[in-house]
């Protein structure tokens, strides 16, 4: 009788690291020689599959940049990583998956249990960089910067030494440094939030000003908040991944992560207290983060939306299936190369052709099952920034817009299909869109003007004859 399957595997840790098979990459440096120089707030899968991997690539030559990973709202990550000495496995999803053990996280803390330790790390002069992946809602932002009515901000302003919010923790650390006469640290947002560094800076200063105007002045003069852009598809960890990783390692990893092989990180080179040599690990240091954001929105995200709406209308389910469609796949490639890129100002150093080809290869990856219906959500918010801006720019320089109107028409047809089937839309304008969709008769000259009445979506384009004519024509052509 074979009991191998029921025998618990040893846990991945520093003590068992040498047991990892030779074909799996391990940290190429002595971990006990590294020192914590980064505190990261928001120790979720994306950080561990992205920023922590870049740092792992550098620690052999720059041992002062190891990471203290902080979970603000749940203990699970810290509880999984602590018995593993911060080690975990990254699975790179491709036709042949590749596994790699990451060692850059030297300490895993949870705010609900380790608040004093977190605050001490943030105040430690050895820490020169605080990074964040807390999602947009984690910044507690309002229309004019910080949402001072947010319950966590209200709490933190009343109890600044016992913060709950990411902003509260950042300012608590800076406040301790200021009081001790220590050097400032750089605070770097790694969330996909437009103008993220400047918005974070504004929120931090507004919070600090309510505590201490001298502290706010010191932060304004000494602390830097670079902008950044990140990109890599990172599916959630599931039981299948855990089983595959354990089998590959011959050890048990309580919380591996997975992502596509492609990864991008663009960072503004504005640091007040040194930084890792990220260029050597493939990070793009740039002063034009907005340009990289624009390229991503108009090429990658616009192509995603195109595949989603036109693919769903063809009965397809996922991005890779849509790319395999003999008409849709080539149309998206042509749209990007011949219609979007020529109307989009690219940031210095970005090769549009190579960028597009990399995106198309990602879309074809069968190991990433990105559901079209997920991409189709929130169309009223996505279409303006992903497609309508390109259409405006194309019109301004006299370029044709017929192909660019096809995915917009695809969205309108998708709305009509869902509405007439009685299916709610995952969209802030659900009621308005479905009312128009239910009344639609299928003729562009009748249906399109009703959609164009949504001025929060279409703005002044609704009065542009060239756009209206092209959209009506595309609407009648899309099946």
Image: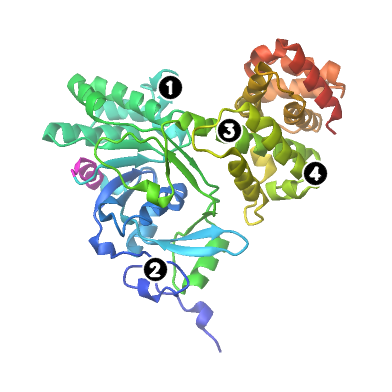
Q: Which numbered mark, 1 or 4, is in the foreground of this view?
A: 4
Provide the residue designation for mark 4.
Answer: 315
Left or right: where 354 falls relative to 54: right
Q: Nearer the viewer, residue 349 or 300?
A: 349
Q: Position of residue 120 (x, y in %)?
A: 20, 44
* Mark 1 element type: strand
Q: Pointers 1 and 2 in contact (CB under 8 A)?
A: no
- Confirm whether residue 428 shows in the render: no
Q: Give the CA separation, mark 2 to mark 4.
A: 44 Å
Q: Pointers 1 and 3 in contact (CB under 8 A)?
A: no
Q: Which numbered mark, 3 or 2, is in the foreground of this view?
A: 3
Q: Nearer the viewer, residue 11 or 198?
A: 198
Q: Tell me the quarter of the image containing the N terminus.
A: bottom right
* Mark 3 element type: helix
Quarter holding residue 95 = bottom right
Q: Give the CA separation, mark 1 to mark 4.
A: 39 Å
Q: Tell me the quarter of the image containing the C terminus.
A: top right
């Amino acid at each position: 009788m074979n009991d191998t399957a029921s025998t618990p595997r040893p846990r991945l840790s520093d003590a068992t690291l040498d047991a990892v098979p030779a074909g799996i990459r391990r940290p190429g440096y002595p971990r006990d020689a590294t020192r914590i120089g980064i505190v990261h707030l928001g120790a979720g899968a994306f950080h561990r599959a992205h920023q922590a991997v870049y740092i792992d690539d550098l620690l052999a030559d720059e041992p002062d940049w190891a990471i203290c990973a902080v979970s603000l709202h749940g203990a699970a990550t810290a509880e999984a990583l602590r018995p593993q000495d911060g080690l975990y496995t990254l699975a790179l999803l491709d036709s042949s998956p590749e596994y790699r053990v990451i060692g850059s996280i030297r300490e895993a803390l949870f705010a609900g249990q380790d608040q004093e330790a977190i605050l001490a790390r943030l105040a430690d002069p050895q820490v020169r960089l605080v990074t964040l992946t807390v999602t947009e809602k984690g910044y507690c932002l309002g229309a004019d910067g910080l949402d001072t009515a947010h319950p966590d901000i209200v709490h933190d302003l009343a109890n600044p030494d016992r913060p709950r919010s990411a902003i509260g923790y950042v300012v608590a650390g800076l406040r301790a440094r200021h009081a001790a006469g220590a050097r400032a640290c750089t605070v770097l947002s790694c969330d996909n939030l437009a103008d993220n560094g400047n918005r974070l800076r504004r929120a931090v200063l507004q919070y600090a000003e309510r505590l201490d105007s001298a502290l706010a002045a010191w932060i304004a003069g000494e602390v830097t908040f670079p902008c950044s852009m990140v990109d890599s598809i990172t599916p959630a960890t599931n039981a299948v991944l855990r089983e595959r990783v354990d089998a590959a390692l011959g050890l048990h990893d309580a919380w591996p992560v997975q992502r596509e092989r492609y990864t991008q990180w663009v960072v503004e080179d504005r640091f007040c207290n040194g930084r890792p040599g990220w260029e050597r690990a493939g990070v793009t240091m740039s002063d034009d983060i907005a340009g990289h954001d624009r390229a991503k929105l108009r090429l990658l995200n616009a192509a995603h939306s195109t595949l989603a709406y036109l693919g769903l209308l063809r009965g397809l389910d996922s991005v890779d299936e849509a790319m395999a469609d003999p008409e849709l796949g080539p149309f998206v490639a042509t749209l990007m190369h011949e219609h979007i890129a020529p109307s989009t100002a690219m940031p210095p150093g970005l090769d549009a052709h190579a960028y597009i080809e990399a995106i198309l290869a990602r879309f074809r990856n069968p190991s990433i099952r990105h559901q079209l219906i997920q991409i189709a959500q929130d169309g009223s918010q996505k279409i303006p920034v992903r497609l309508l801006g390109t259409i405006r720019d194309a019109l301004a320089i006299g370029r044709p817009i017929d192909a660019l109107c096809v995915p917009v028409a695809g969205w309108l047809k998708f709305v009509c299909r869902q509405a007439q089937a009685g299916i709610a839309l995952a969209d802030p304008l659900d009621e308005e869109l479905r009312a128009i969709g239910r009344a639609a008769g299928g003729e562009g000259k009748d249906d399109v003007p009703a959609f164009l009445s949504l001025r929060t979506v279409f703005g002044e384009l609704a009065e542009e004859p060239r756009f209206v004519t092209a959209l009506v024509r595309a609407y009648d052509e899309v099946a």
